[in-house]
Image (spheres, rainbow, N blue to C red):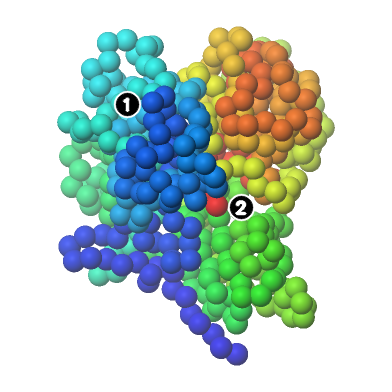
Amino acid sequence: MICRVLFLMLLIVVGAGGFSTPASVMSQDAAPGVTIHVVQRGENLYRIALQYGLTVDEIAQYNGIVDPTNIQVGQRLLIPLASSAAAALPTTHVVQPGETLRSIAELYGLTVDQLVALNAIANADTIYVGQVLNLVPGQPAMAPTIPVEAAPVVSPESQTLIYVVEPGDTLFKIATRFGLTVNDLASANEISDPTVVYAGQRLLIPGVEPPQITVDLPPNVTSFTLSPLILVEGETGEFRLTTAVPMTITGQFLGRDIRDATPDGGLTHVILVGVPVFTEAGSYPIQLTLTDSIISQQIVLDVSVQVLAGGYGNENITLLAGRDNLLDPSLDADEKAFIEGIMSGFMPTRYFNGPMGLPAAASITSPFGRKRSYNGGPRTFFHSGTDFAGAPGTPVMASAPGVIVFADTLNVRGKATIIDHGWGVYTGYWHQTEQFVSAGDVVTVGQVIGTIGATGRVTGPHLHWEVWVNGVPVNPMQWVKQSFS
Ligand SMILES: [Zn+2]
């Protein structure tokens, strides 16, 4: 048997005196970096192509556009980025429908005050769609890019892990992930003010061995990649395999059956996995069985994957007197099982395309993942979505294209809508006051599907937004920042 050994980490190319770019972490078989451009008033394909150093034909071809003179304001274009462009830090951001200064600040790991100062904004409530915001001091307005790949990279000389700061990261969050203190991290990187880190910054992670994903690639398996290379508790990861002959892939990861999406008849395999919150940091096996579709021969691939802590933090919640009965698990069990049943499905058609949009033009009040203890009890609960506070009646928008699979009223979740985006990816929108869609409807990204309300078990009006991947609730904000497949 011919075995090729693939050292994913050895594919990193490090130039003299510099570190590799995030994009170069991927092998040549991986999808290149992609960003989304939302067509603004007055733009045409020629102007957009110029912005990204591409030709009109390249963009048209990449987006299946037959008539390049016919593009619509608000249309989302996939922009393939060259590896150098993919690694470039965003210096500006074009305000999209549904965004607020707060949501934009969170996207880039800034504070609202920093954004206000960088852009000399007099009134934080008056940003407008299409406005170009500076993200760094003194930068000219340039094409907006979103870093789509932010995997840790490694410096081979030192064999020390290099972590590329992602939007929304803080030094505390990163330190927690690697089991370090903020001071350890600050001193290893000569950072004088630990409150200031920026997306794209490369940090040395002292004392942490770089990951080695070593796979004997069997015959007929031409590539195998994992993105990001190190998974994070509560986040989404993507395995991608290509095979020389049609195969089906089965296997398990973290106790769940994996699902093999094969958009081209069985040569490309995309496996999306959600890492459940409460998964302990450590190394986890994933065993894949590849079955040749023609001769039924089976190959087994064993891979070990590293999972880091999410660093989501804890919160203690004291319920109002007399509400302890809400903690009775049997009260919620039926509804939870019902929701899980829907959101664990798998539609082979992929509807999602690029990063998801925010579901409401409202500020985020409670992030995903906080581990909760009620009334001093065990910390066995966690916040399974992202909360947006909005006035009742504020539109709720579909985060990505898909098919409505549920739109009805539940006890805990109130008026709830679930969208199936294909490949095991679902979004849920709870506590609405109005619903404008019903099961079976096909929706587009940004389509208004309902309004914010206070139905179900809530303390006030808000939208609770969930993203599920292969039956696991995951951090929705990762899907806003990053594009999968
Ligand atoms: Zn919530």
Residue at 60% over, 90% down:
1
Q: Rounded to the nearest whole Å, what is the CA distance between mark 1 and mark 2?
A: 35 Å
- Percent x, y for residue 223? 53, 71
Q: In screen coordinates, is 71 left or right of 25?
A: right
Question: Mark 2 or mark 1, which is nearer the start of the sequence?
Answer: 1
Mark 1 Cβ and ligand 1 under 8 Å apart: no
Q: Tag on residue 262?
A: none
In the rendered view, would you say 151 is above or below 37?
below
In the rendered view, would you say 465 is above or below 262?
above
Residue at 64% over, 15% down:
451
Query: Please, what is the three-letter code of the amino acid marked with disc 2?
Result: Val
Q: Quadrant of residue 117?
A: top left
Q: Mark 2 points at which residue?
A: 273
Q: In which quarter of the image is residue 7?
A: bottom left
Residue 107 visible in the snapshot = no
In the image, 437 versus 324, the foreground residue is 437
Residue at 68% over, 78% down:
299
Q: In screen coordinates, is 351 left or right of 199?
A: right
- Percent x, y for residue 484? 53, 49
Task: State the SS at label 1.
Answer: strand
Q: Mark 1 points at which residue?
A: 132
Query: Please, what is the three-letter code of the amino acid marked with disc 1?
Result: Val
In the rendered view, would you say 351 is above or below 73?
below
Residue at 62% over, 29% down:
398
